[in-house]
Amino acid sequence: QVRLAETGGGSVQAGGSLRLSCTASMYTSRMNYMGWFRQAPGKQREGVASISISGGTTYYADSVKGRFTISQDNARYTMYLQMNSLTPEDTAIYYCAAGYLSMGQRGLVLLPVEYNYWGQGTQVTVSS
């Protein structure tokens, strides 16, 4: 069973930065993408960024392009999310996830339903 653990959440003022980390207990053949998702109070969980484990191809939600950067260190089974220029609208619980998407599903990399392994989440709060 794959276990994911997020660290790095916290509180920051608008315009600040945070770096989230997600460490997996293992990589398996049942996962070829990892991603970051977030859920704000009263809202649905949404995709933020995703990365292919083998090729490193990255995908971003329009709302975070140019501000967030996803990266990975496969030797450490760890994925990162560097978040810059944070705004109060970025306040949410951030989850990391892993899943397997086929070639035909690459357009779905930011959909939570495509991921079957999830971390517990870490709170990010941005104050104005």
Image (cartoon, grey):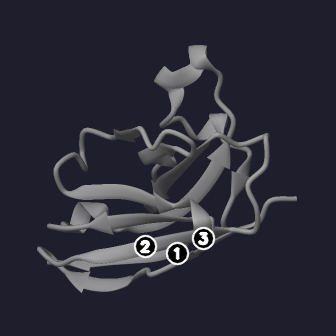
Q: Which quadrant of the figure contains the C terminus?
A: bottom left
Query: In this figure, which residue is indicated by the disc labeled 1?
Result: 122
Mark number, residue 20: 2
How far apart are labels 1 and 3 at the CA level? 20 Å
- Disc 1 crowd rating (10 Å Cα; few below 14, some 14-19, many 20+) is many
Position above or below: 80 against 115:
below
Query: In this figure, which residue is indicated by the disc labeled 3?
Result: 76
| Residue 116 located left or right of residue 37 | right
Is the residue under label 2 in contact with that under label 3 (CB below 8 Å)?
no
Which residue occupies the extreme right position in the image? 1
Horizontal and vertical percent for residue 75?
A: 60, 66
Is the residue under label 2 in contact with that under label 1 (CB below 8 Å)?
yes
How far apart are labels 3 and 2 at the CA level? 15 Å
Position above or below: 22 against 18:
above
Q: Secondary structure at mark 1?
A: strand
Number of the front mark, 1 or 3: 3
Number of numbered labels in the structure image: 3
Position above or below: 27 against 102:
below
Which residue occupies the extreme front position in the image? 75
Residue at 47% across, 22% down = 107
Q: Amino acid at mark 2?
A: Leu
Q: Secondary structure at mark 2?
A: strand
The residue lying toward the viewer, choosing from 46 and 36, is 36
N-term-proximal mark, 1 vs 3: 3
Mark number, residue 84: none
Q: Amino acid at mark 3?
A: Arg
Which residue occupies the extreme top position in the image? 104
Horizontal and vertical percent for residue 30?
A: 78, 40
Horizontal and vertical percent for residue 110?
A: 48, 37
Position above or below: 66 against 12:
above
Residue at 16% across, 50% down = 66
